[in-house]
Amino acid sequence: MRQSVAIADSGFSRFNSLMFRVESTARSKSDLSGPKRACLLLASFLFALIGCDARIEQFEPNRVFTLALAKSRSIPTEPASEDVSQSLEVLFGTPNEPQWPEQLLAEEGTEDLVDVERLRRAAGPVSSGKDGTHRGLFREHCVVCHALEGSGAGPASQFQDPYPRDFRHGVFKWKRTVRGAKPTKQDLRDLLTRGVPGTGMPSFALLSPDDLDALVDYVIYLSVRGETERRLLVGAVDELDYGDTVPEDDFRIRYPADSEGAGLIEDTVVRVAGQWDAAESRLVEVPEPPDLDAEEMAASIERGKKFFHGQIANCVGCHGASGNGAVVILDYDDWTKDYTTRLGLTPSDREAMQPFRDVGALRPRPIKPRNLQKGVFRGGGGGPDLYCRITQGIAGTPMPAVSVVDQANGKGLTAAQIWDLVHYVQSLGRE
Amino acid sequence: MTGQQSTETAASPPARGLHRLVVLALCLVWPLIWVGGLVTTYDAGMAVPDWPGTYGYNLFLYPYKTWLLGPFDLFIEHGHRLLGAVVGIVAIAIVVVAYLRDPRRWVFFLSLGLLAAVIFQGCLGGMRVVLGDRTLAMVHGCVGPAFFALCAVTAVVTSRMWWREPSEEDAKARPIGYPLVGLIASLLAISYVQLVLGAQIRHVQPTTPPSQFTMTVAQHVMTALLLWVLSLLASWRLWRCGDLTLSRPGLVLVGLVTLQTVLGVATWVVNYGWPGFVGQVPSSSGYLIQAKGFVDSIIVTAHVAVGSLILAVSTMLVARILRVRGRRRQAQGVHDDVLATSNESLSPSAALSH
């Protein structure tokens, strides 16, 4: 009974807000003539009968991580989550009205990391202007997979393998920076243009350069916001005594305020944004590829083959003989490990996973080492790309880095030897 | 009218012009659905933020150069509106001609219904724009094909086929039973359900939970298989009816559903890539989705347009089979059930006699 009242009530308020919207649109176009107004009114009644869009007013809190944290610390994390969400909204705004904590970042000079105008263009509902520019780009192009928060659990995510990226970890695979660093803006631009073949991630090469810039900024925005959320949750529980209850005022996560809590917020935002800002300076140094004629190339490939199957690089352990991908490693990527193995849970244990699934986690799927004989490279198949892949590994995945050494020893490979490996890997796809 | 003696010759319908107008409407509505589909595919629905005008201009007075030479979004959105308005005008003409020429009152009411549907659909489109609402866009996308189907019904009842008198052949022909009528009617119902499911996938909300989306997709796929089996069955049964006005559309339907299945798979792939479980398809492991690719957009939009064509053909079949059934029963002197009597009262000689 109570439920039905509630439903009727929400229906009524929806209708009211609708009529308000209709009226205000009508008012804003002052020259509405009688018939037009009648049309609008008629249509609005129809509209009230049919229903309308789910309203999007806030970012969802990161429930999966809130739960994972609760399990790992054996402590309730809901109070922390609530406070963190509120502060995030003050700092970063909402899906319709994004904000960027410029003032806060100005102290470190990282406020220009993203452009607020671009964020506004990428956020909000889809529309387009008289000159053909689109707004609401993220919802037009990305949200079905990556979801509003960038959690990677969008409506179509269950069909993807690998799952769409969860931006909130701040970890990205396909980039030219060192493993632990953020990608550069250029990396993200290249990624959007190139797409990720063999996965659901499309190429957006046909979008205008302005659109791409706006999307890149928006990805960074979502990532900074999401990583700040994660770090603040950890900070709240580990440093500020959040638990069953909230701590005293000075330690509460509140912004703006002159307190320990606010200090933690500032430090966290500055730190995360700083890492993005520093990406340019953390590019992998890729030495000039050796200039080889056909014969030398064949020899290089032959040497590469030895390293591939050898002790130091041991690529064969995961990628199989000649990279045929026939090895089963039963491992998971870091985004999945975050709520499974790191908590001591078995990803294939349905019962253990259920609480996480209930708050929106996707069903864990093992990561598969690539069958290199197909010649498909998700992060680009060029020499420098593969040089980065091999010397850094792939961030967020089990694929390890091979260390680069000056003198050949038993622990790593020299730059020239890495190039041999690159040539061998490239040759596999051509066969 | 002395149709009774000349059972062989087809009586000519009293309003040929009306039928031609309805066919004209059909020929306009299908492209209209195409353009409407393109508007959604290109997310151009909000390219013209006001309504019923276009950037303050009256719909028909919007400078055609700005329209034709402007951005693609504006081109298709304004074009969609113009074409819609033309269909509206044709609908008005249909009402007028039906009133003046067609002796059947219910045909006049049907034509009024047609006009009401266009206006409703136009308002829905307008509200979708004024309120920038995706759910409304979805409803607008579902009403369009329904209107198309209504046009198909009107076309059948104004066609020559409808006016043909019962003949010797009808007297000898195999009677059409409820099961077959039911089969065709379920085909109609299911193809509409399928269309609505498709619209839900296409107009997915940003906040739809993945499990719900997956469920909708699964239903859409299963319904597709069901439709395919049903259409094969229907086509086989219709073939045995020995009436070209039924067997031909039956075959067309099978062809369309098959085409639609292929288009559906293609639509999925160009939007979401090959699903994991078809890893064996050659080159699927390197497949790269191209967002907003031209060919891709055409495939997706074709899937939408063929869906409404299937709906229209099955609607046409329902109307025709009821008619043929009634005629055969009449010729065979069976009057005992509701369908036959209702068909009786629709019969041209009955209509013309008052």
Image (cartoon, helix red, strand yellow):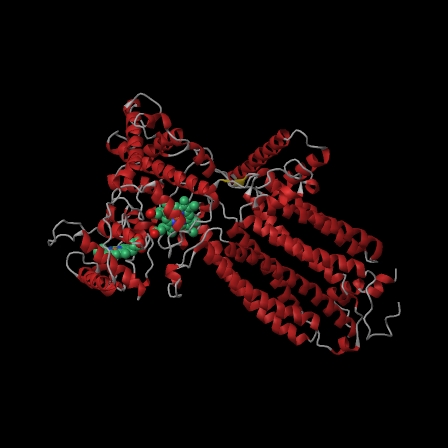
How many numbered discs sit on the rendered protein? Answer: 0
In this view, B73 is above or below A428: above
Q: Residue at x 57, y 48 (%)?
A: B39
Image quadrant assignment for residue A111? top left
Q: Position of residue B30 (x, y in %)?
A: 64, 56
Q: Nearer the viewer, residue A419 or A211?
A: A419
Q: Is residue B315 left or right of residue B14?
A: left
Q: Quadrant of the C terminus of chain A?
A: bottom left
* The one of A114 and B317 positioned closer to us in this rendering: A114
State which quadrant residue B316 falls in. bottom right
Is residue A169 in view from this perspective? Answer: yes
Res A361 visible: no
> Residue A333 location, x and y as percent?
28, 51
Compared across the picture, whether B293 is left or right of B168 comes to left
**Measured from the top left, where is residue B163 in percent x and y?**
79, 66
Query: Looking at the picture, does residue A88 appear above or below residue B188?
Result: above
Residue A134 position within the rendered picture, expressed as x and y whole percent measured from the top left = 51, 41
- Who is closer to the viewer here, A259 or B341? A259
Name the outermost residue toward the top: A258
User: In the picture shown, does residue B271 fall above or below A305?
Assistant: above
**At x 68% / y 41%, what residue is drawn?**
B59
Above or below — where is B149 with respect to B329? Answer: above
